[in-house]
Structure formats: C-alpha cells, structure tokens
C-alpha cells in the first residue's frame, strides 16, 4: 500500500496564513485602483495586461507553498501489512569455489547450480528463503525473505568472483562452516521454533577447510534441521582450465568429492541426496519439499519511504522561470 505524507506537517499551516496576507494585499491594491480616474493612469502603473499581474501574485504564492512542502519533508511511504503464510524456512547453501567453473556440465557447474536454484524459487510461493555463499569461508548473502524477485536477481548475478579467492584464507571448500552458518541463519527466527526448517546444500567438492562436517551434522540433528545435499558433478575425472600470468593456460586436476559424506549428512538429518548430472534429475526435490509440514508464520508490517524533494525542486525551478519571464514583461506592482 502506497501513502503520501509529510514528516513535518506543521510547516503546512504557514500556507493559509500567507494566503490570507496575499488576499489583504490584493484588496488593498484594488482599492487604490478605484482612485484612478482614467484607464491611462492604470496603464501607467501596470504596463502590461492585468493577466500578468494576477500571474505574478499566483506565482509568488505557488513558490511559497512549494517551500512549505519542502520544509515539511514530503515522502511516499510503502507499507506492507502483516499477513499470515503457511510454509517452511529454507537456507540455500551454494558453493562458489573456483572448481565450480569446471565445464563438465554445460555451460559450467555454477551455472547449472544457479539454474536449479532459480527454477526452485519459481516453484515455491509461501516459503521463506535465505542464501549463503561459501568457498574457503561462508557468508550470509541474503537473510530469510519472501522476496523471490530479489532472490532470483541475486542468484543471476552470483559467480565465483563474488568471494575474493585471491585471498588464500578464502580459497577451498568449507562445507562444515557453511552448514553451521546455515543452521545459524535458520535459528535467528524466534517466531515459531516448530516451523519446518531445511538446508539445501549445492557443492562439487569435498570439505577441505576448517570445521569437520560431522560437527555441523550434530548441530543440525540437535536443531532438527533437514539437509538436502546436491552434488554438482558431471564426470568422474575432469580438470579446470585457468590462466596464470606466468605459466599461461593451465589445466588443473579437480579432485573428487566425498560422496559418502553428502549421503551421510542427508540421511542422518532426514533429507535427501541428489547428483546433479542434469537439470531434469532434480525435479523430485521440489515434490518432496512441497510435502513437508508447513506451519503458519506472521509476517510483520514493513515500511519503506522515498523522498520527494526532486519533484518539488523541479516545480520551484519552473515557478522561478515564470518570474524570469514576467521580469521581461516589465511588470510593476
């Protein structure tokens, strides 16, 4: 719902006061005009047609009104009312390490993963979704939200460069850390701890950095959070082509994944394990998630505002242009 309002409306009370003063000035001027005996005397005072005189008074009042509007701080308020929705909370945990650029899946692994996520967001209607990106370290990129349009735009703009992996500490595949952050993202909601919460993990590598995934598994079990794991992989053996400033084009062998680890995490938490050899192979995940128990959640009112200074400044410039025009008409008052 859109609403126009002033932050400091008391400035608007100056408008009727100024209007009253303008009326007094107008009638005093008219009284002086009656004392003139001939039109020639009137024309000597007002060189141009009287229309410009009234235009001048109207413009002055218009300018004063615009200044009052500006001081009152005009804004357009967008209000989203509280509503109830039945659904689940989902944390999408996406691997953006360099190996996700491998082209064994066309056009490459990360683009396939993005397509899977995008299609998934197209199918849900009442579930809150958050996004975590990770390589050698995970980052909460989007907190839980119903704004699927923003989520899809964010996914479209995601690539392996979104995390600066030139930094050695950010290189690698920290699956354990990413899952713990996913648990943390879902646990930030205190409205209904009985609400179904799941993590969807998309990765192409084995955990080779920081926390052991078994510790993250224990946390998910304690929090009763299901984990759906997706292995983004097309070939058993493959390599990644990179360009080095010294060695030139290099083919780097991409290590295999710890598939047993992904299967273990999924089965222990009550989720499912998938291998993303094709987009069509993942359709079943949508059917399973749609059958999960969905609980009601209250979505509180949100309020955003947009300042309207530009419109009134433009009108002020237009009003001053009228005064400039009247000046060249040699108006006398």
Image (spheres, rainbow, N blue to C red):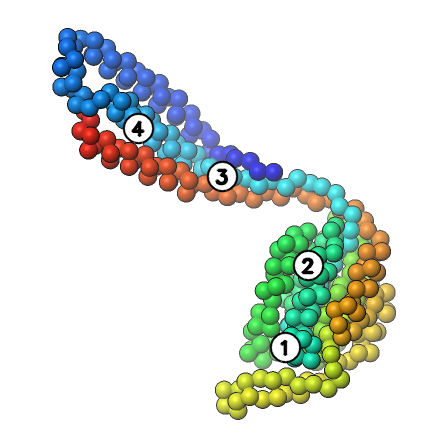
Going 70% across and 58% down the picture, which residue do you hit? Answer: 121
Q: Where is residue 233, by image quadrant?
A: bottom right
Category of crowding for the residue at label 2, using alpha-carbon neighbours closer than 10 angstroms: few (below 14), some (14–19), many (at least 20): many
Mark 3 and mark 4 lie on one chain; the one further toward the N terminus is: 4
Q: On the image, numbered disc 3 is attached to which residue?
A: 75
Q: Assess whether mark 1 and mark 2 are in contact (beta carbons under 8 angstroms).
A: no
Q: Looking at the picture, does residue 171 appear above or below residue 188?
A: below
Q: CA distance from mark 1 to mark 4?
A: 65 Å
Relative to 297, is 7 on the left or the right?
left
Foreground mark, 1 or 4? Answer: 1
Foreground mark, 2 or 1? Answer: 1
Indicate the secondary structure of the residue bearing disc 1.
helix
Question: Horizontal and vertical percent for residue 14?
Answer: 39, 26
Mark 2 and mark 1 lie on one chain; the one further toward the N terminus is: 1
Q: Which mark is residue 130?
A: 2
Going 13% across and 19% down the picture, which residue do you hit? Answer: 44
Q: CA distance from mark 3 to mark 2?
A: 30 Å
Q: Assess whether mark 4 and mark 1 are in contact (beta carbons under 8 angstroms).
A: no
Q: On the image, numbered disc 1 is attached to which residue?
A: 101
Going 47% across and 42% down the picture, which residue do you hit? Answer: 307
Relative to 73, is 299 on the left or the right?
right
Does any portion of residue 176 appear in the rendered image?
Answer: no
Q: Quadrant of the C terminus?
A: top left
Q: On the image, numbered disc 4 is attached to which residue?
A: 60
Q: Looking at the picture, does residue 30 appear above or below residue 262?
A: above
Q: Where is residue 12, by image quadrant?
A: top left
Indicate the secondary structure of the residue bearing disc 4.
helix
Foreground mark, 1 or 3? Answer: 1
């Amino acid at each position: 719902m859109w609403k126009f309002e002033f932050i400091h409306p008391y400035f608007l009370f100056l408008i009727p006061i100024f209007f009253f003063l303008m009326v007094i000035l107008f009638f005093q001027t008219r009284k002086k005009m009656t004392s003139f005996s001939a039109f020639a005397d009137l024309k000597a005072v007002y060189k141009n047609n009287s229309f410009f005189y009234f235009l001048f008074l109207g413009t002055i009042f218009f300018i004063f009104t615009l200044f009052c509007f500006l001081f009152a701080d005009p804004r357009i308020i967008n209000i989203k009312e509280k509503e109830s929705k039945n659904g689940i909370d989902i944390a999408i945990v996406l691997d953006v390490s360099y190996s996700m650029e491998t082209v064994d899946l066309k056009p490459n692994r990360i683009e396939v993963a993005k397509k899977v996520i995008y299609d998934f967001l197209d199918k849900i209607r009442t579930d809150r979704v958050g996004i975590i990106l990770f390589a050698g370290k995970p980052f909460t990129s989007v907190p839980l939200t119903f704004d699927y349009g923003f989520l899809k735009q964010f996914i479209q703009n995601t690539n392996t460069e979104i995390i600066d992996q030139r930094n050695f500490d950010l290189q690698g595949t920290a699956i354990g850390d990413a899952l713990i952050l996913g648990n943390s993202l879902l646990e930030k909601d205190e409205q209904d701890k009985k609400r179904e919460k799941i993590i969807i993990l998309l990765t192409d590598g084995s955990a080779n950095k920081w926390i052991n995934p078994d510790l993250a598994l224990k946390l998910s079990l304690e929090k009763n959070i299901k984990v759906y794991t997706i292995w983004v992989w097309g070939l058993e053996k493959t390599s990644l082509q990179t360009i080095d400033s010294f060695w030139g084009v290099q083919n780097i062998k991409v290590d295999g994944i710890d598939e047993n680890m992904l299967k273990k995490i999924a089965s222990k938490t009550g989720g499912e394990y998938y291998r993303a050899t094709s987009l069509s192979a993942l359709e079943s995940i949508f059917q399973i998630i749609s059958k999960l128990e969905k609980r009601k959640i209250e979505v509180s009112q949100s309020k955003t505002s947009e300042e309207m200074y530009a419109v009134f400044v433009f009108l002020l410039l237009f009003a001053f242009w009228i005064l400039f025009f009247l000046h060249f008409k040699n108006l006398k008052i």
